[in-house]
Amino acid sequence: MAIEGPFWRAIAVYRVASLVYAAVIMAQQRGYEQPVAGWLVIGVMALWTAGATYAYAVPVLRRWPLLAMDLLVTMACLLASPYVQGSLQGAVGTMPVPATWVAAPVLAWAVYGGRRTGAAAAAVVAAGDLWLVRTPDESVVINGAVLLFLAGVVVGHVARLAKQAEERMQRAAEMEAAQRERERLARDIHDSVLQVLALVQRRGRQIGGEAAELGRLAGEQEAALRELIASRPATPQGATDLRSLLLRYGSPEVTVSTPATPLLLPAETARGAAAAVKAALDNVRAHCGPGARAWVLAESGEGTVTVSIRDDGPGIPDGRLDEARADGRLGVAESIRGRVADLGGHVSIVSVPGQGTEVEITLPS
């Protein structure tokens, strides 16, 4: 990620500064008891500083093999301190040969993997440092171990927060770009497709006959398309707003009423509920005639979502549903009741001859 770049550059600067500090200490101590070995360790540190700075700057190389090698080289330089310092090891104020350079892999692990991996790298380096303790004042080494842990945890936490912030910003930018494209398409559709559908609907009603049915279908598609281009994809992942599915069924003959707030359901449940509503509206058209009116009302209760479909048709005679089921016509039994039952809900049907029918679908939210 681009936001990681400043972290890796900061670690590179820290490596160079720590290397210079370790070299200054080595010069002040005149190479300790083994100057050749001491300056050899400094040389290894310089080479690895250059190599690690380049490797961490290349995103494809930032992998666990590089991180593991970083930690191994650091531990090798740290554990070489007893041989280089000899009897001077453990003297008051004496630091290991790498000095503060040992914190670099801890910071790298923290930036790459977060606070847990940073703490793990700090534990390894601190364990090596504690193993080398030869000083009467062990609190100095313990304080160094605590600082390593704090650096690993804090830097890892900050790096993780920065990555999450970048991901959110990227998603927001993508959503904004998608919304702009959606608005552009909506303008184009409004200037072409919607006007044609409205014309077909109007002319179909004027002509009558089969053209009237084509006009009705064009009106339904116009309403559905208007709702589609006006909807906003702002529902949580895995959830679907039932309102957007029901509003597609709106037409001059079908009035759809929904709450102002989303009716969020699992995607499968929302699609099943919408399909059951469509089946009920199909029954209205099939049995009540093309001019029948229907009203769809959706509302949310405590832990439930209820959708009722009411029409002004002639109603269902007593025993008609049982008779249809016996004859193998399973529109209500399977398309509505069966589908809703599979979703964990239930259906109630109230019909009064001459006063229409009401189908009420209740689903858990």
Image (cartoon, grey):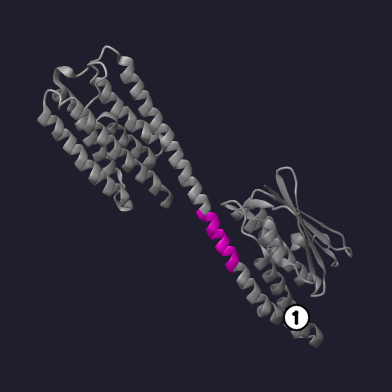
Q: Amino acid at mark 1?
A: Gln
Indicate the quadrant where residue 112 lies: top left
In the image, is residue 310 above or below residue 289?
Answer: above
Question: Under tag 1, what secondary structure?
Answer: helix
Nearer to us in this view, 43 or 255? 43
Residue at x-position 75% and y-position 46%: 301
In the image, is residue 71 above or below residue 299?
Answer: above
Nearer to us in this view, 42 or 153? 42
Nearer to us in this view, 23 or 291? 23
Query: Would you call the spot at circle 1 few (<14 residues within 10 Å), some (14-19), or many (20 or more)?
Result: many
Residue at x-position 26% and y-position 29%: 99
In the image, is residue 116 above or below residue 329?
Answer: above
Magenta includes 361?
Answer: no
Q: How many marks?
A: 1
- 57 horizontally vs 342: left or right: left
Where does residue 30 sit, x and y in percent of width and height?
15, 26
Residue at x-position 76% and y-position 57%: 258
The magenta span reads: 170-181
Magenta includes 174?
Answer: yes
User: What residue is shown with label 1?
Assistant: 201
Magenta segment main secondary structure: helix
